[in-house]
Amino acid sequence: MVRIKEDFLARDTLVVAKELLGNIFCRKIDDKIYRGIIVETEAYKQEDPACHAYRGITKRSASLFKKPGTVYVYLIYGMYHCVNFVTQKEGYGSGVLIRAIEPLNFTGQTNGPGKLTKALDITKKLDGYDILSADASLWIEYGNSPNSKSIAQTARVGITQGVDLPWRFYLKENKWVSKSRPTL
């Protein structure tokens, strides 16, 4: 399998969020590599009030301003981690939240960002991690691009600001998607 390169991630966040669908999320733990098809994403950009980069660089959001391919992990509700991949360019706070994957070679609940990170042992210790390094334990491989008719675009889930932005993408009819919403 071929790993995605920085040029894939160094594009507009909305494009990356949509085009990550169908690619393979990979996590190496000890000597085993766990793989799953990315089936649901959400885009977050610096000018978006729901983005952690909206108020500038803070201790929490610093990783969002690093180079494309950097991992941004944060805690929600004091108990669930969420994993994002930084996009666009260094110095501009943006990233794609991976909301759900369809497991390929393991079993587990991955239909939601907290379930995904729990199943694959993704915690704050991976915040700032570079998925593009040769010895990465978390990376993305090219998969099969879905046709545009199989992709739904909706408002994002679980936010209170920027709720009108249709920046969530998912594969229609996929049982691993976290929640359904009317498509736009």
Image: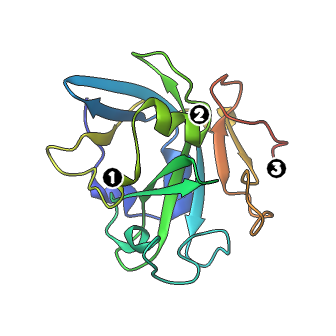
- Is disc 3 surrounded by few (<14), some (14 to 19) or many (20+) residues within 10 Å? few
Q: Amino acid at mark 1?
A: Lys
Residue annotated with mark 1: 125
Q: Earlier in the sequence, mark 3 or mark 1?
A: 1
Q: Amino acid at mark 3?
A: Leu
On the image, the x and y values in percent for residue 26 come to 34, 33
On the image, the x and y values in percent for residue 181 come to 82, 41
- Determine the residue positioned at 34% across, 63% down: 68
Q: Quadrant of the N terminus?
A: top left
Q: In whole angstroms, how far apart are the C-alphas of marks 2 and 1?
A: 35 Å
Q: In whole angstroms, how far apart are the C-alphas of marks 2 and 3?
A: 17 Å
Q: Which mark is residue 94?
A: none
Q: Give the image quarter of residue 162.
A: bottom right
Between 80 and 120, the residue placed more toward the observer is 80
Circle nearer the viewer, 2 or 1: 1
- Determine the residue positioned at 14% across, 46% down: 134
On the image, the x and y values in percent for residue 63 come to 38, 68
- Determine the residue positioned at 25% across, 35% down: 2
Residue annotated with mark 2: 147
Q: Amino acid at mark 2?
A: Asn
Looking at this view, name the residue that lies furthest to the right.
182
Q: In whole angstroms, how far apart are the C-alphas of marks 3 and 1?
A: 37 Å
- Determine the residue positioned at 61% across, 79% down: 47
Element under disc 1: helix
Residue annotated with mark 3: 184
